[in-house]
């Protein structure tokens, strides 16, 4: 069985400060890991994914994530947050050979001006 | 631009009155998914199609049905909506391999009166 944990319901940062959204996962084999962002009354937008290779993955809108196998983590980061980054962020995992994504509970990010 | 389209964006129905939500895609993806999302919670997978093969989640109520007449279109039928079925319904697509990300439509917000 596969699962994802996002330990923080909310993250609040000031504009221009670094942003980190935490995610840990559990899978039986090697994971495929994804980050999505959701703005109010919109669908989910894909940010980035880890499949294999370099542990640091770069994605859309200046976001990046670091895969850490020993800590089973895939934290999302942005060096300098913008007010427009305020949204709901979901981490998701998929086991190899599975079509089903398992989502975390989501983390609401608020960036204050 | 290739995309996933959902109609309508907002749907109001009465308790017990059947409703159909539609999804179309121009991505030519094999796999299509329907999710239910309540109150900023994680999306909950209802079912998915791999081409014409239908895969129902074990905990999806019988009240929810789906049709996929061709590659581009997929429909969600709610036979007798209850108040608890009020939610955002998200359609998503992906290529057939499990490392590919899912592309989400903007969602249909269903209100049940």
Image: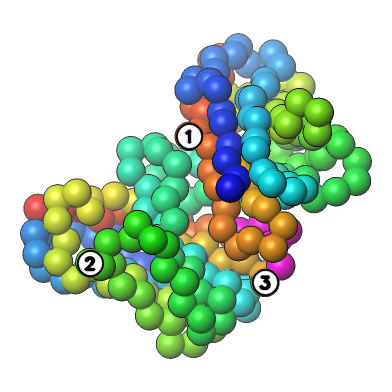
Answer few, some or many: residues within 10 Å of disc 1's Cα (few below 14, many 20 plus, some between 14 and 19): many
Under circle 3, the secondary element is loop
CA separation in Å, label 1 and label 3: 26 Å
Under circle 2, the secondary element is loop
User: Label 2: which residue?
Assistant: B63
Residue B87, position as x, y percentages in the image: 29, 50
The answer to whether B113 appears left or right of B40 in the picture is: left
Q: Which mark is residue B96?
A: 3
Answer few, some or many: residues within 10 Å of disc 3's Cα (few below 14, many 20 plus, some between 14 and 19): some
Q: Which mark is residue A97?
A: none
Residue A65, position as x, y percentages in the image: 76, 33
Q: Which residue reaches farthest right?
A: A54
Judge whether residue B100 is colored magenta: yes
Residue A42 drawn above or below residue B47: above
Residue A50 drawn above or below residue A109: below
Q: Which mark is residue A105?
A: 1
Most foreground residue, B107 or B64: B64
Label 3: chain letter: B
Residue drawn at 37 percent across, 53 percent down:
B36
The answer to whether B28 appears left or right of A112 in the picture is: right
Under circle 1, the secondary element is loop
Residue B2 falls in image quadrant: bottom right
């Amino acid at each position: 069985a596969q699962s994802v944990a996002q330990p923080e319901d909310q993250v609040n940062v000031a504009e221009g400060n670094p942003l980190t959204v935490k995610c840990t996962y559990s899978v039986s084999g090697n994971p495929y890991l994804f980050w999505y962002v959701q703005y109010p009354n919109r669908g989910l937008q894909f940010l980035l994914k880890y499949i294999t290779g370099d542990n640091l993955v770069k994605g859309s809108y200046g976001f990046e994530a670091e895969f850490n196998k020993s800590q089973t983590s895939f934290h999302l980061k942005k060096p300098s947050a913008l007010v427009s980054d305020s949204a709901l962020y979901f981490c998701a995992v998929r086991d190899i050979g599975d079509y089903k994504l398992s989502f975390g509970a989501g983390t609401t990010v608020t960036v204050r001006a | 631009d290739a995309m996933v389209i959902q109609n309508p964006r907002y749907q109001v129905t009465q308790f017990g009155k059947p409703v159909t939500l539609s999804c179309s895609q121009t991505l030519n993806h094999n796999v299509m998914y329907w999710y239910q999302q309540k109150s900023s919670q994680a999306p909950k997978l209802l079912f998915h199609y791999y081409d014409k093969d239908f895969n129902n989640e074990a905990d999806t109520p019988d009240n929810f049905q789906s049709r996929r007449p061709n590659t581009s279109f997929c429909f969600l039928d709610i036979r007798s909506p209850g108040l608890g079925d009020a939610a955002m319904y998200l359609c998503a697509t992906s290529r057939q391999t499990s490392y590919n990300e899912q592309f989400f439509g903007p969602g249909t917000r269903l209100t049940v009166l």
